[in-house]
Amino acid sequence: MTRIDSPPRKQSHSNGRARETAESLAGKQKDISVSEFFAKNRHLLGFDNPRKALLTTVKEAVDNSLDACEEAGVLANLAVVIEDLQPDRPATAKSSRYRITVIDNGPGIVRKQVENVFGRLLFGSKFHRLKMSRGQQGIGISAAGMYGLITTGKPMVIHTRPSAKKDAHHIELAMNTKTNRAEVTVDRETDDFPPQRFKTLNAGTRDPGFLNSEDFLTGTSVSIELEGLYRKGRGSVDEFLELTAIANPHARIMFVPPTRVSADEQDDLPQVHAKSPTPAAAPEPTVDAVSDAADIDPTITTVEKDGVILFPRGTDQLPPETREIQPHPKGIELGTLLQMKKDYEASDGGTLYQFLQDRFCRVSAQTASKFCDAIGVTSRTRIVSVEPPQIEKLYQVFQETRLAPPPTDCLAPIGVRQLLAGMLKGVKAEFYAASSREPDVYRGRPFQIEAAIAFGGELPADDSARVIRFANRVPLLFQQSACSSLKAVIETGWKNYALSQPRGSLPVGPLVVMIHMASVWVPFTSESKEAIADYDEIRKEMKLALMECGRKLGTYLRKRQKMQREAARRDVFERYIGEISKAINAINGTDAKKLYDALHKQAKRRTAIADAQLDEEGKMVKADDVEALKQDEGVVMIESRAAQAGEQVQGPSQETPTGKKIKSSEQGDLF
Amino acid sequence: MAKNKATGRKTSNSAKQRDKATLAKIVELADDVSSSAFKGRDIALDIPTRSRSNTVWNKKRGILQMGSAKSSRELFNLSQAKQFMQTCLHGNSIKQLIDADKTLSLRAMFYKGLHTVAGTSEKTFADQDESDVILEDMEVSLGALREELHVFAKKAGTMVGNITIVDNGDEIDCRRMGSGGYAVPSIVESDVIEFKKVDADFVLHVEKGTVWSRFNEDRFWETHNCILTEGAGQPPRGVRRLLKRLNQEHNLPIICLLDCDPWGHYIYSVIKQGSISLAFESERLAIPEAKFLGIRAKDYAECDLTDDVQIELNDNDKKRANEILNYPWFKDHSRWQKEIAKMLSNGFKMEVESLITKDISYVTEEYVPERLKKRDWLD
């Protein structure tokens, strides 16, 4: 007989192990801190493998620096240095230890905030705001520091000078994952900002233009040691910085890569910028004499010299400041609504009527009134008295009511001229077009799409087009096929714009396509923020932007083809005139030279268009549609690169068929 | 007759006059070009159109003639520029030939004008065909015959029979030409070929050399007192000119023995009233009174030939036959309409050689003599 009040005895398994009960299990459960969770799930933050870990670290630091500079209203100067700490490792090593340092000339960080900024996950100013910014979640740099700590045991080293007149702070800290708090190991004042140590790395860094103290009166430098892998090619730090430079033409970025590049990567980026050490070798491209060519200088290009890669500043115009906006009723989840109610109770404690007007955009007194009526409360009902089921009803009413779309001045698009400046800097092409759409809304959130294309010049003609994607000015390097922007490019009919495009793929030709989405909340497909999720409104806007650019390209290409034909025609006449002059001279004794000149004059007159092309000034012919292109501020054309590319294109194809009919459309053009 | 010391070629006074006239025309062409160039006017050559649309059927005279339409070949037209240049080049070559009093073949003219255009890798002529076309254009636009341009074609055609000629000063008795026969030259003008003694009663013209050899071996020309010629298919200008002269100067009837098929009919039609491409030559080449002896569509039954000789008419043949039916010169000719209709209803064609199935010399001993006697031919 078993006594009921005796403690339950552990029953035995057949193999002798004691079985767990709910209680004994409960004893083992405990809280997991956020940091601990992410420590074990690094892939969620972009630290899956050594190469990506390196890239993510650079990305987070650079994003922060650019954001900080923009908020302070300064033109960003950035230096990114990657040092290989194990240069003598064997060739088969899958990773190495690196020190990554990013230095900026932003406003710096106040001493009190340093721990919070660098040593605490999910702490930041950006998460709770609906404002267009690069880091939507405050995870970034702290996670990188944590990763560094885990892989090398070394703390983050921060130098920051928030005030130009005072000394900088030198802080070293490491994150305690259990408490989700930073522990500071070194804390002192120093005048070593920007850190001078970097100036001795190589010949390029010894150049006084690198890390010049005058350029970095205030600012922050953060160094993280971690296990990573530096490789060039797709998805590399180089590509990230190159694209960042394109999307942020106001920024000046200097990059010092590690000298040793890991063995088995030869996947080079499609050559987009020239690494010519002597810019004088390439002919200076000339721009049309268009009045606002002043703000776009095609001679500015990326330069690599003595181990330092410089992405120069393309424009002195800062991006406009963005405003923060209130959420729009249609843009929030039910859970968020409930949370907002609770927050409001705690902080303000007023009526529902007031809550609706204060905490949402586009809710007027009248609208608030209507909402109250719809859920059966009055304008005086205190928010505390509103029950959750009523909040649910409110949420449904939100979705059903017609409301004005949210304000869009919270967005700061890159802008057409800036897009062109950025593309021009990074891509050596002959034709550039850019388009910036009007803002639109998806699910209650404002967004704006911009696109730019570069064509011809030195781009390879036989490859598929290269698509570069940006969200809030941050390049998206991975998961291209999952991204809405790529789908938009594929769905655009590039054949209409004189390009070839196999079905369901990217167009083929010397083309670079850039898409930028600016939004208070960019919808990503995953936490790693690599691909934009598909929304109809977004895709539609992307295609419209692409089509605008495509149209301009089409006009340009058709004109160029026509001019090539004209040039070919003129060549034909040139050749024969010589023969004819000689033959006629032999028959009737006419002076051959005089006859040649007379015939030549006629040839010129008849092929006037082709002649203008060879005019020294490089001015293009006066035709209506091309004139329109010239005046279009969304277009830049560089003839000299077109001429070089054209010579390669012409080749053997321009023999005149004898006795065969040429299509009347060709003949009719001129004759 | 002046004799060219270098070549031994004899040039008559009339030939010299002709040369002068030709030269003047070429120079006129060149002057046109240069004056237009200096005045800034369009530079073009007017070339009479050698196409069906510009061919006129002169019913009264029974020959095809060239109309007056001209097409303009412009220098500053992309598709014509090269031909314009080629025309100028040949003009120069011809002048040189006339000055040197020599002749060249068509192919040699091609080579003469062939070189690489200065400053390019393009040749002046892609192939001989291009050159030939230009020369024909020049004949027409200058109104001078190829011979007058001192250009000759490959010769083809053979003659044997009761005739003695003097060829470029050499006397040739065509009764004594053995098995080979006299090779008809490309130029058969009176200043080259003189008919010294003509005893024959008529000329029998056959399509192929092999048929001709049959007749020669059987010495048909001797037994029937005629001249025997062959044209190697579509007879070249030399042969046609020869036939024309024999017909015109000595009133010899021209009797044709050709295959019973659209090609044979076409050959006859060209001999009879001229061709479209050489319509400007019809005056000198067409023989409206030429007769078509055979092979006739009715011969299958009449000669009692076997099925083996039948060659089925293919779609091309039928198309061609219908085209010929509609030629203006056959359209109103009821007997020809019937002839072609009969062939079409037979559904097959027959070659002259099919008569071999009867007997090796059936054609020379029975077929032709019978029809000659009965005057059974079409004209």
Image (cartoon, coloured by chain):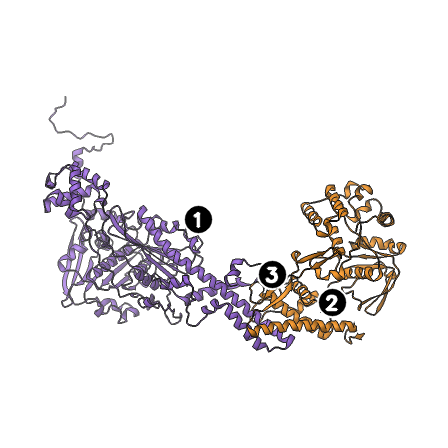
Q: Quadrant of residue A102?
A: bottom left
Callout 1 amino acid:
Arg
Q: Which residue is mark 2?
A: B147
Residue that numbered label 3 is attached to: A659
Position of A472 relative to B138 (above/below)? above
Residue type at the position of mark 2:
Glu
Chain A pictured colour: purple
Q: What is the residue that sits farthest to the front in this orientation?
A: B60
Q: Quadrant of residue A372?
A: top left
Is A13 situated above or below A483?
above
Is residue B29 in sight in this rendering?
A: yes
Residue under pointer 1: A503
Instruction: Identify the element where label 2 is drawn.
Output: helix
Q: Which chain is orange?
A: B
Secondary structure type for disc 1? loop
Subunit that carries the residue with mark 1? A
Q: Is residue B192 left or right of residue A337?
A: right
Measured Cα–Cα span from mark 3 to mark 2? 25 Å
Q: Position of residue A498 (x, y in %)?
A: 44, 56
